[in-house]
Amino acid sequence: MFIDQPKSAFEASLAFWAAATGRTPEPPSEPDSPYRSLGLFSGQTLIELQEVGEDTPPRVHLDVDTDDVEAEVARLEALGAKRVRSYDDGRYCQMVDPGGLVFCVIPPHTPDFDEQATTWP
Amino acid sequence: MFIDQPKSAFEASLAFWAAATGRTPEPPSEPDSPYRSLGLFSGQTLIELQEVGEDTPPRVHLDVDTDDVEAEVARLEALGAKRVRSYDDGRYCQMVDPGGLVFCVIPPHTPDFDEQATTWP
């Protein structure tokens, strides 16, 4: 799960959620990374902050983890979601649910993926 | 965590997320309840849908579970969050983070609360 914040609010929101949850944000993986992680909650739920453009309102977005992004995007399209855009040569896909809620389909990202994943026929 | 959807999109979004996650929504607790639960994910994260007003855009909101709502709201205000409104005689409080992201402070709601809760000095 990501908390998306435009640049103007990113540091204040990161500091707030770190203090609110009692965590120290993990160091950025690269100097210009738009991501900062607060780590795992209850041993399973990953909370990360992402810096987004000023035209994106503050939001939480869910990620659907999958070992086959293209197949999962096709499955979710058949269920009524719409594809918005792909990133990184199709490695990630941003979609919206039937109500317009933004979410992403991404490669496995959570430590319990193998154990918890649902296998679709 | 709640997926909030206005009435016009609520049933379609509920059907989508149920199919997307392979869950059957739990029956509503009362006939007019605005809430439907998809249950626990990875044994810990509760995903529920809430029907909200047409003026609220589709969104995900996080809940901060606490055994003392008023004290937790005061702690989070001191960290930079703002109180928006209270519900049910102060039993629930809607707040925004420093970037304007909506979240709620609520009584314990997750099965691992006792085990996972942070005690603040």
Image (cartoon, coloured by chain):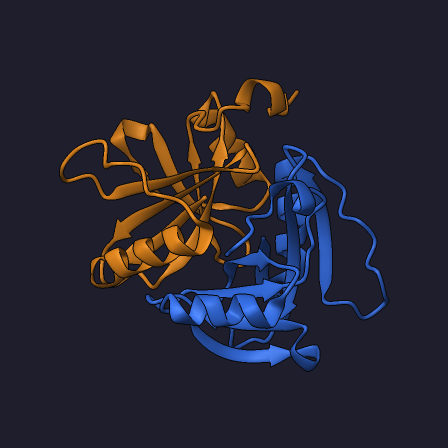
Chain colours: A blue, B orange
Vertical position of residue A44 compared to residue A78: above or below? above
Vertical position of residue B108 compared to residue A100: above or below? above
Residue nearest the observer in this picture, A79 or A13: A79
Q: Position of residue B62 (x, y in %)?
A: 48, 45
Query: In the drawing, does residue A2 fall left or right of residue B15?
Result: right
Residue most extreme to the left: B31
Q: Where is residue A67 in the image (x, y as percent from the top left)?
A: 66, 60
Query: In the drawing, does residue B55 fall left or right of residue B69?
Result: left
Q: Looking at the rendering, which quadrant does residue B113 occupy? A: top right
Q: Looking at the rendering, which quadrant does residue A52 occupy? A: bottom right
Query: In the drawing, does residue A90 fall left or right of residue A121?
Result: right
Q: Position of residue A92 (x, y in %)?
A: 64, 71
Vertical position of residue A97 compared to residue A43: above or below? below
Residue A81 visible in the snapshot: no
Residue drawn at point x = 61 percent, y = 54 percent: A13
Residue drawn at point x = 61 percent, y = 42 percent: A116
In this rendering, the count of numbered labels is 0
Q: Position of residue A18 (x, y in %)?
A: 68, 43
Residue nearest the observer in this picture, A56 or A104: A104
Residue drawn at point x = 31 percent, y = 55 percent: B15
Residue drawn at point x = 50 percent, y = 56 percent: A121
Residue A70 visible in the snapshot: yes
